[in-house]
């Protein structure tokens, strides 16, 4: 296999990604709910990436990136730094291809995340919990092992892979008026926008972001990247700064960003457990909170919502008041 | 429409129930999981009745019973006593036919259950929390309103309806070796046994029961109904005594009963949240606990498990230790 390289992401890039990762990732279910229709006034279609392998959409981008490598590149393995869903996703993608995945994780990463990477065969290097230490450890592994970096979101192969979730949803429901996806680093949102606009010229794509980590909102408003400093949100998957590649794509596709409060995120998360009987993580609830926010005026519209993941600490569900001792 | 009456439940009764309730209830998803396959050694197929309307399989039996009434009978409405899933299910079934549902609920019923019945249009009568008071209130409504009693499980129409979940599963996977369903009053389990044996002569049907409410286990062992006194289990849906109609059917179909501990129920429930990303209630976890119990020796078998419901108090998940004040 020869290396696949892309300068940017087009609709065709996502169609190719879909074909490339087929058989490695699940075509996830789409669920509907009379209760959510009633509450939002819209006709809602939830794309269940919480039911995806490893519990998040991240396996889509990770597989596409790993399968784009030439055989020679692949043999040396892949490397990334992540304390979250991308770590498990890249471990599985590397395992699928039979190559090593070197995962740099900061001290203090949740035990369950570490265990999940180990179970999937990822080779873990612990480091100090700073961005500098993470990047240095990553760089060292690149040099020492010759491993290829697979960034969690600032990578066109990854963005193309993430776009396949929205592509599947649009294949099932081509007449959606609005598509909502959460935004952290922007891989899912930018990929979704390209996929959605490739299938429909009239669909609006909306990024949902926590108020306490609203760098995408600010970046789009100012027309220049505003780095995220000290995010304060329960949505751990969205504490990343919007990446430069995604930023350009979001501008090109005129994606709107809406922000939601922490209270709205927790309420939306509990409501999904209660009504849809689905376990989602706080990042996925951000999109649901946007759906339920009356300021978006979704009444009468057909709305797709990507439930991005379901990896949550079940001992610390955010609506349960625990007494401190 | 004329009244449909049955003396017993045959496979054909379930086929008729399936056709009768079609369009009123969901054909629920069946999910698989490599993790559960690895843990059990079996190939497992989960039938997701937690995703059913009103969050449990109970709408199947309730709709079948309501749709079996003649127009004249139906006009006077239906009545039942229940603090659980049957109350919401009968309310919805009555609403589907445009007739009143009189629901007797004991004082102390969870607020969420009361709210759910109200939202579905059920007309609630509160009573003292004793079986005698519940039956008396039910009888009074029968006399006063002329309403038809729909018992939660000791009713052939209800049993036939509940059997349609297993029927759907067997239609999708006809070569199952084992089918596991939880047992409380026995409506689901007996209906499942008839459906399974109608589709396959070689399938084993196993009822899963909490150790702290093991009247079905004892009744089958002794060959006579042993009433359940003071059940002690978190599985609130299984605190009912096995009904006489179900008991006869379980004997006829040589259904085995297995018991599981409270610890196993809680562990299984948490594992389903964690791995399947599905919200289930403790009663549904009883079947999963049986699946994971090595004493059943399911290695290499194809096993269906009915996840009976997903209505659980999300503020009181049983694995979360809460400090008492």
Image: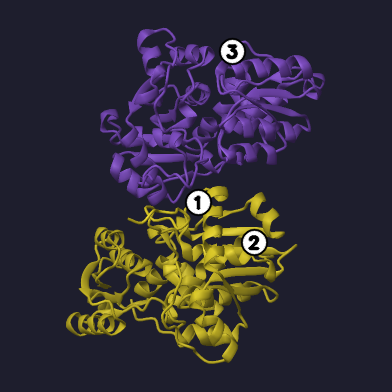
Chain colours: A yellow, B purple
Kindly identify the residue that appears in the image at 58 percent across and 58 percent down: A46
Outermost residue, left side: A144
Chain at numbered mark 1 = A
Could one spot residue B169 in this view of the protein?
yes
First reached walking from the N terminus: tag 1 or tag 2: 2
- Quarter holding residue A129: bottom left
Q: How many marks?
A: 3
Q: CA distance from mark 2 to mark 3?
A: 45 Å
- Where residue B235 appears, x then y in whole percent? 44, 32
Indicate which disc residue A173 carries.
2
Evaluate if marks 3 and 1 touch, with contact meaning CB atoms under 8 Å apart. Answer: no
- Please tell me whether mark 3 sits on a helix, a strand or a loop: loop
Which residue is tagged 3?
B8
- Quarter holding residue B26: top right
**On the picture, is B289 further left or further right than A161?**
left
Residue count near mark 3 (Cα–Cα under 10 Å), binned few <14, some 14–19, many ≥20: some
- Please tell me whether mark 2 sits on a helix, a strand or a loop: loop
- Where residue A25 appears, x then y in whole percent? 42, 61
Could one spot residue B27 in this view of the protein?
no
Which residue is tagged 1?
A278
**On the picture, is B122 further left or further right than B155?**
right
């Amino acid at each position: 296999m020869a290396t696949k390289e892309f300068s940017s992401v087009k609709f065709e890039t996502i169609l190719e990604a879909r074909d490339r990762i087929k058989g490695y990732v699940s075509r996830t279910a789409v669920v509907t709910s009379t209760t959510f229709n009633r509450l939002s006034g819209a006709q809602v279609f939830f794309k269940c990436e919480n039911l995806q392998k490893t519990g998040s959409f991240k396996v889509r981008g990770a597989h596409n990136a790993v399968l784009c490598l030439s055989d020679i590149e692949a043999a040396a393995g892949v490397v990334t730094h992540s304390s979250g869903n991308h770590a498990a996703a890249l471990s599985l993608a590397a395992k699928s291809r039979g190559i090593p995945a070197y995962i740099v994780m900061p001290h203090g990463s949740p035990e369950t995340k570490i265990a999940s990477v180990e179970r999937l065969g990822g080779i873990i290097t612990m480091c100090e919990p700073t961005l500098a230490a993470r990047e240095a450890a990553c760089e060292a592994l690149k040099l020492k092992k010759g491993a290829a970096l697979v960034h969690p979101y600032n990578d066109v192969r990854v963005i193309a892979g993430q776009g396949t979730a929205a592509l599947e949803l649009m294949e099932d429901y081509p007449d959606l008026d609005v598509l909502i996806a959460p935004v952290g680093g922007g891989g899912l949102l930018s990929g979704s926008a390209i996929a959605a606009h490739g299938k429909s010229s009239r669909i609006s794509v909306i990024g949902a972001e926590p108020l306490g980590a609203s760098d995408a909102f600010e970046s789009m408003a100012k027309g220049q990247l505003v780095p995220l400093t000290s995010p304060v949100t329960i949505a751990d998957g969205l504490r990343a700064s919007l990446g430069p590649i995604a930023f350009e794509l979001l501008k090109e596709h005129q994606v709107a960003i809406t922000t939601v409060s922490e209270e709205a995120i927790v309420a939306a998360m509990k409501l999904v457990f209660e009504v849809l009987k689905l376990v989602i993580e706080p990042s996925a609830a951000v999109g649901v909170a946007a759906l339920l926010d009356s300021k978006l005026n979704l009444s009468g519209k057909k709305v797709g919502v990507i439930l991005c993941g379901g990896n949550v600490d079940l001992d610390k569900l955010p609506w349960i008041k625990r007494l401190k001792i």
